[in-house]
Image (spheres, grey):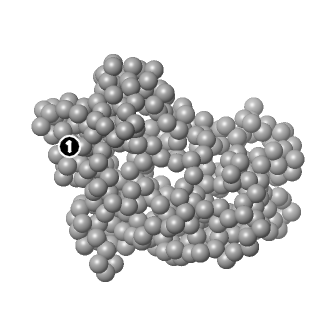
Amino acid sequence: MGEFACRACRGQTGHLVLDLGEQPACDYFPPCADPGPDRLYPLQMWLCSSCGLAQLAAGATVPKERKDAAPAALVAHAADAVRRVAAAGLLPDGGRVAEYSSPHGGSWLGLLADRGLTPVHDGGPADVVLDCFGMMHAADQSAALTERVARVVPRGALLLQYHSLETIVRYGQWNALRHGHYAYYSTTALIFMLAAHGFSPSTAWRFELYGGTVLLAARRAAESSAGPDGTIRALLAEDARASVLDPAMVLGLQVSARAHAKSLHDWLASERSAGRTVLGYGAASRAVALLRRAEADRTLLPAVADASAVKQGSRMPGTNIPIVHPTELAVRLPDAVLVLQAELLTEVRAAFPEIEAAGGRWVDVDTLSYCAASR
């Protein structure tokens, strides 16, 4: 990796654990009228030997991710998370809250205001500093964490939500790697980063979102007399079992990438050969590298439906697959709908019962398995 330095600890020793080659920017959806070719950028994951942070190896792409409406699954997740944090006594009535959000979900500020907290929008101090999938978008991880901890008042709490590297490794979620996402946190690495800023974890909550996400609460180490609770210890034990600090284990993502892309290509080709039509749903950034590595084009996947008005009329980066309005599903009634964002499956399936009524099936892109027919 030459002179590359860790985005958190500045260490220069590490290993390349996933290389997806040259990929288009996953956060820019070109107009259908633009035939390309799209500009390509290297897409690689590097694992720091010093602090254990898995991170994007190359620099930034130019486009920025757009904030879309939060899927129902993320809305429900936010409500559940706020309930759990409140039950733990970490939301002081009349306190202040500062939020760092991301393009992947809606704001929690309304839910927190209902709990008696007042939002702070000017960069000022807060009793609760919340980061929901936001910090991973910072190229300089050390500076991003420095900014967040500096805003936590004495006896306040820092809440960090992240898609666990242990989950990514365990389930082979290689396409979690994408441009603009600079860090992939294991609990072990995140605790190391917090310690360097004088913070230590107190508790955490697990969620099924994305296969396994964690919301971790941390306080200043000098204020944390009890130390990490059982949930934190269990998360660290899971990291150890998954060997998330071992580059040889994380390299398994490379094997998963090859197998997944081949399986998708073969399945789409088989469906086309059998005369069956497949449409996609969810123009997700995580699907960009998958569709390109699977050599999918509009002959295999004629269109991807998406509820985002700004994406409709565009195409998937790196392919000629157009993005259409979701009502196209009801018009075309495909034999199968390939759902490219697993968290959307429940709501889109409920929104289009006519797919199954006409004999069509819903397919999870991660497993290529058909969902059981609705009763």
Where residue 146 appears, x then y in whole percent? 26, 50
Q: Residue furthest front?
A: 122
Q: Residue furthest bottom?
A: 2
Residue at 72%, 63% (x, y): give it. Answer: 31
Say which residue label 1 marks. Answer: 199
Q: Is 138 rendered above or below residue 100? A: below
Residue at 55%, 63% (x, y): give it. Answer: 63
Whether residue 109 can be seen here: yes
Q: Is residue 1 left or right of residue 253?
A: left
Which amino acid type is marked by label 1?
Answer: Phe
Residue at 42%, 71% (x, y): give it. Answer: 58
| Pick the front one: 129 or 79 | 129
Occupied quadrant, residue 25: bottom right
Where residue 325 appears, x then y in whole percent? 77, 49
| Pick the front one: 304 or 126 | 126
Occupied quadrant, residue 319: bottom right
Occupied quadrant, residue 141: bottom left
Whether residue 263 can be seen here: no
Where residue 276 appears, x then y in whole percent? 83, 59
Residue at 86%, 63% (x, y): give it. Answer: 275
Neighbour class for label 1 at 10 Å: few (<14), some, many (≥20)?
A: many
Which structural element holds mark 1? strand
Q: Is 238 rendered above or below residue 288? A: above
Q: Is 352 rendered above or below residue 246? A: above
